[in-house]
Image: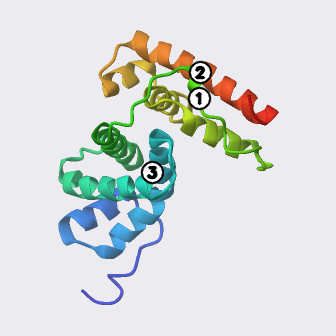
Amino acid sequence: MDEMESQPVPDTSDRQLAEAVLHYGEEQAFRELYRGHTPRLLGFVARILGRSDAEAEDVVQETWLRACQALGRFRWESGFSTWLVGVGFNVARDHVRRNARSRELDLEDFPDPPGPMSFPDDRIDLERSIAMLPDGYRVVLVLHDVEGMRHEDIAEQLGITVGTSKSQLSRARGALRHLLCRTKRGGP
């Protein structure tokens, strides 16, 4: 392969890049896919885990490994990004199960945010509050309110009923309001 062929092609589609990775092991194509999709994937995984540290980065790396292994089975019935986030969701869910981090909701047991919030940006308050939600509530909230999934799809993905999805979303929103109000007041 000469120098010109290994250079990235402007406006190369995800499908072309994925096929180059799958059929030719093109490292540059993989790098373009990785750079283009990892920021969204990392944000999604961090929200699902309730963490944005090395743990989320490990899940993202595992997601890319599984995605590359499954790439030949991807049928392109959805966008690459949608499929990749689905793989990431499954990896994150497995990670949560493995680490048994599930928590029961009791609003009185919510830990107070450490010290008064010194962040001027409300978005940081929201992200921290989402991270404090119990796993089940956080997952449904992120899938519905952040990723825009329908309750039917969430129920299928999580193996729960539509009613449970709706109930957990309602409770998650209530807990989130409670946490945000406590954060704005600087404590209990």
For badge 3, the amino acid type reads Leu
Q: Earlier in the sequence, mark 3 or mark 2?
A: 3
Q: Using a 10 Å C-alpha cutoff, classify the residue at mark 1 as few (fewer than 14 neighbours), some (14 to 19) or many (20 or more).
A: some
Q: Is residue 151 left or right of residue 182?
A: left
| Image vertical order of residue 157 relative to residue 28, above or below | above
Image quarter hosting the N terminus = bottom left
Q: Is residue 12 in view? A: no
Query: Left of 77 or right of it: where is 11?
Result: right
Residue 102, percent across and down? 39, 31
Disc 3: CA contacts within 10 A as few (<14), some (14-19) or many (>=20): many
For the C terminus, the quadrant is top right
Residue 175: quadrant of the picture: top right
Point 59% across, 29% down: residue: 110
**Closer-to-camera residue (92/38):** 92
Please give the residue where the numbered disc 2 appears in the rendered image: 107
Task: Point out residue 170 in the picture as x, y percentages from the top left corner.
Answer: 56, 16
Mark positioned earlier in the residue sequence (3 or 1): 3
Which amino acid type corresponds to the residue marked 1 in the rendered image?
Phe
Residue extending farthest bottom: 3
Which residue is under mark 1? 110
Q: Which residue is mark 3?
A: 41
